[in-house]
Amino acid sequence: MFYKVVNNDNRDHIIKLNYQIFFEQSKYFLSLSNSTLNINSAYINDTVNIKSCKNITLTRDNLSNYFLNFDSDIIKLDPNNTYLFKYQDNKRKLLEYHPLIRFNQNDISFVEGTNSISVTGTIDNGAGERNTKAYYMTECSTNGDLDNYQYATKFFDETFSGTHTFSVDIPVNNYDVGTHKLYFRGVRNGGYGTIYEFSFTVIKFTINKKYTTKVQYKSGIDDNIEFKIEFSFQTNKEFSFSYGIDSLSTQTTISLTSDPQEIRYIIALPTLSIGEHYIKFRAESVEDQIPFKIIESSSPELQILTTTSSSNPTLYYKGITNEISIEYQMRDEDGKGSFSVYHSLDNGAFTKIDDSYNINDASWYRKSFSISNSLISPSDETVHSISFYIKDNLGKQSTNQVFYFKYMTNPIIKLQEEMKTSLTYQVDQTIDIKLIYRDARGNGRLTIYTNIYDINNNNNIVSQNNLPIDIDSSTEKSTTIAVNINRLTYEKQYKIEIKGINSNSEETNYIIHQFIIHLSSPVLTITTTPLLSYTKTKDQFISISGNVKDSNLGEIRLQYKYDNNNEFQEFHLLNIGSVTETKSFTENVPIDQTLSEGSHSLTIRAIDSYNKYHELSSYQFTFNYNTPELEIIDNYDTYNPPIYIRGINDSLNINMKVTDYNKVDSLKVYYSIVDVSNENSFYCQMNGEISKTFYLPYEIPKQLQENIYIFFRFMQKK
């Protein structure tokens, strides 16, 4: 036999060995290169020098396993082989005893918490049929009677020849993390066979992290759910791993190649109810779960891009526009989905528009849709509406948006600014209409017709006018139309209707406006106002100046009244011939001589032929009664009085003038010398006259001494 060994000096050695193994008196012998070794002792360290001094050592361990050590390599002696040395896994038992036990797998590993392991293999009973029992021991014993050994468990009892398979489940849940051994031994017809070691390692199992990449998901929006688990094992092995949503629905095998290591799984997200759910998983015997939530998907948002209302619709025209187009923008916070538009015309049933579209983010998307106007009857008055919303593939829909429009056949007109509602007779000769017009056809002629109706007279037409306008553009344009109203009478309400008709006999909308023509009132201004006081009889008039104008034209009477008298008296008449004319005047207002003495008021007004008047605020004045006046006509120098000589000129002839505007019948004149008790009087007959001249004869009293005297006189009405 030949055996090739790689020596430590990296040179190949071919060793030829002659061997003989024999049994004699319970001793085993090995014949090696003409030398015989007794290997029955407990430990043998004999050395045989083979060729170039290569050392071979024969040893036995505590389980009576024998080994040849070839320097640092262990060489197994196997008497059952056809050759002495066979290099395999460095180690082979030197001698074995039947029954022989062979394991299908040894040195296995499993995670902590494993309840049991299954050990399988074969038992070799040799030639001839014999009864064989097999045991495994948790603690090794070389003694017999394994049936009564507390650490031994019998797992096989069969009668057979040759080889037989075996399988045994061994509890391992009480073993700590680390490497452990079990010991297997067979008993054939009462004879004990070789003890075989079975090694296993309990692996530390740790979950360092477990999480989903998101904590919230939306059914129908999120296609998948991703979760990650970080394990920590003390050794590398393949192990069973089961996982699923709310149950362990999927099983696989994973192998960790690093410590720690994160594994990542992506699961298709099914339709789940709103609320909390779990990623359940089991690694070997350890079960755990990762919570996550299913939340409502969001509803799409919708914004119409053209602002309309029932009072401000978008205008479309028959023959120009064939479809109604609506622009809008939408978004969905979910950032994905398929969307369809549903619309309703004039509050009818909602129908789905055939086209649908997808989005892939949460930004605003600008969209539009159109509907044919072939089903809409043209009308210049009807305001149509299109209500619409969008719905996603999950049934979520936006709020409704409404688009208002008119589908018109006719041109349009509208007021650029409001028309007057009150006009003044003979001042306003026209009613002005500032008009905006448009004919979307952009050509032809548009004639504007204006009819004025007398509302107070059964709406009879009192005026008709028309104005042709050439259309050269489809855009809005403006014009001013002055409708003559000089034939309309005053203090009446009128209605004016405005419409346009184009070259195709298509009419615009109507504009209807009511107005009234009022008479004006005179405008009176006083420039010279009355005085603050007047005297009875003496003052016969109050003189005033001023001016007056009146757009009603014709006669204007200036009138007055005193105090609270209800009746005005006329004091002047003038005529206005033009609406721009202003007449000036200076006139006297007669003073009512019957007024009582004291304070009074004067009210002045101007009133025209239409009985329109302008009344001024009253003027206040004082009316005084007269005091009779007596004066000496002759001139006297009070510093050089006349001289009278007793006996020569003993009487005074004084030329006097009496005035009394009260026009009395007579006045009694009193006279005397100052400081002299000789009062005298006489009657002056006035006879209603205002003034009279007379001589007053006066006899100088003889008892007067020479001196200068003052002649005193006064009067009294009779």
Image: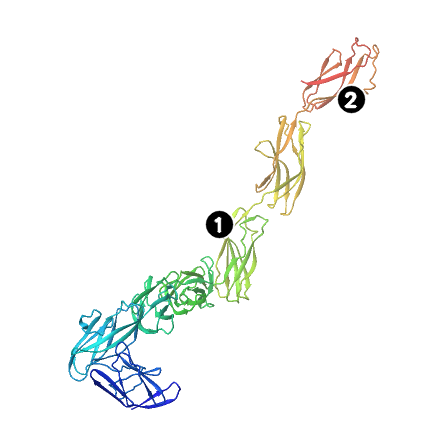
The answer to whether residue 274 is visible is no
Quarter assignment of residue 146? bottom left
- SS at circle 2: loop
Q: CA distance from mark 2 to mark 1?
A: 79 Å
> Is 654 situated above or below 371?
above
Along the polypeptide, which appears first: circle 2 or circle 1? 1
Q: Quadrant of the N terminus?
A: bottom left
Q: Residue at x 81, y 14 (%)?
A: 708
Depth order, front residue of 703/213:
213
Asked if the residue under mark 1 is in contact with the one under mark 2, i.e. CB atoms within 8 Å, the reply is no
- Residue assigned mark 1: 455
Which mark, residue 718? none
Q: Mark 1 falls on what kind of element?
A: helix
* Crowding near the residue tagged with mark 1, few <14, some 14–19, many ≥20 C-alpha atoms within 10 Å: some
Q: Residue reaching furthest top? A: 703
- Residue highlighted by disc 2: 633
Q: Residues within 10 Å of mark 2 (few under 14, many from 20)?
A: some
Q: Is residue 430 above or below residue 215?
A: above
Q: Position of residue 641 (x, y in %)?
A: 82, 18
246 or 406: which is nearer to us? 246
Q: Residue 489: x and y, percent? A: 54, 48
Counting every numbered tag in the picture gives 2
Image point (57%, 58%), residue name: 480
